[in-house]
Image (cartoon, grey):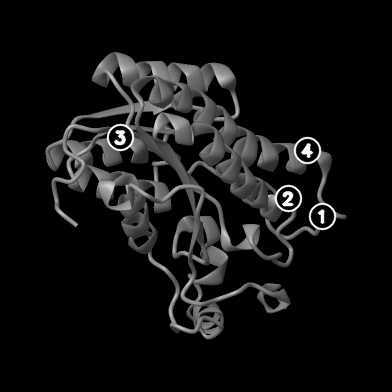
Amino acid sequence: MRNDCLRGRTAIVTGSRRGIGRAIALALAGAGADLVICDVDVKDGRLDETAQKIKQSGPQCLSLQTDVSRRSDVEKLVQAAIDTFGRIDILVNCAGIWIPGRTLIECSEEDWNKVINTNLKGCYLCCQAAGKAMAAQKKGSIINISSQVGLTPGAGAGAYPVSKAGILMLTRQLAQELAAFNVRVNALAPGIVKTDFNAEFWKDPGMEKKTAGMVPLNRLAEPEDVAEAALFLASDSSSYITGEVLAINGGWSPHSSLAKN
């Protein structure tokens, strides 16, 4: 893809302090987009580091502390993007949390609410706020980050698979509703990606070898593998694609063998 294919466009990427969100923000900036990045945690300076790296590559970047589960925070985020850049062309909903080690029967109400409010409600609030702006300008691309375990169950993941499955239906519903406004809505469903988010599956060499051995491509994904797919969906190269879910899993499907022994 051309390294200037997003020049003149503005993208919001939530959860862009680290991992997949950071990789996507950098990929979009590398294609020329101006960025609005956000995360609920800004104390460690990693969100600012991402912003500086984006600016060094040329595009402009605005970074904000945002709790996507709060409507007021989301509305401030979207308004800041419009006030700064005049429009929103791309939204990537990457903010998410995972509280592993519990079945749904064991999952506490507190953990259920925390996961659903961040992963599913947060995605909905961002889609709603940015989608209105995109509909008004008659163009836009929304990319929601789901998961392979949103497609098929995963062991000991509590409310996480439910939240990610909800994102898939949210994506398909919004794709139908926003198509008349030339706004596309798609989802990515990564398998296990080598980020801090799921370090338990790869930071130990033995565990990484065991987990990668269940993947037909015989390796775990890097954040950049997901970022390149997001770049495709953000660009005009995917202008006739909406309501779709792209699995990025190396051919892997989760099952009970992922449970810790």
Query: Do callouts 2 and 4 mark residues in contact (Cβ within 8 Å)?
Result: no
Q: Is residue 66 visible?
A: yes
Q: Amino acid at mark 4?
A: Glu
Mark in front: 4 vs 1: 1
Q: Is residue 59 left or right of residue 104?
A: left
Residue, disc 4: 110
Residue, disc 3: 48
For the residues labelled 4 and 3, the Cα–Cα distance comes to 30 Å
Q: Is residue 235 above or below residue 134?
A: below
- Residue 6 in percent (x, y) is at 21, 41
For numbered disc 4, what is the local secondary structure? helix
Residue, disc 2: 159
Which of the marked residues, 2 or 4, is nearer the chain's N terminus? Answer: 4
Q: Amino acid at mark 2?
A: Ala
Query: Do callouts 2 and 1 mark residues in contact (Cβ within 8 Å)?
Result: yes
Residue, disc 1: 104
Which of the marked residues, 2 or 1, is nearer the chain's N terminus? Answer: 1
Mark in front: 3 vs 1: 1
In this view, the residue in front, 194 or 235, is: 235
Which residue lies at the image location 44% right of the left edge and 65% below the top edge? 194
Label 3 Cα crowd, 10 Å radius (few <14 / some 14-19 / many 20+): some
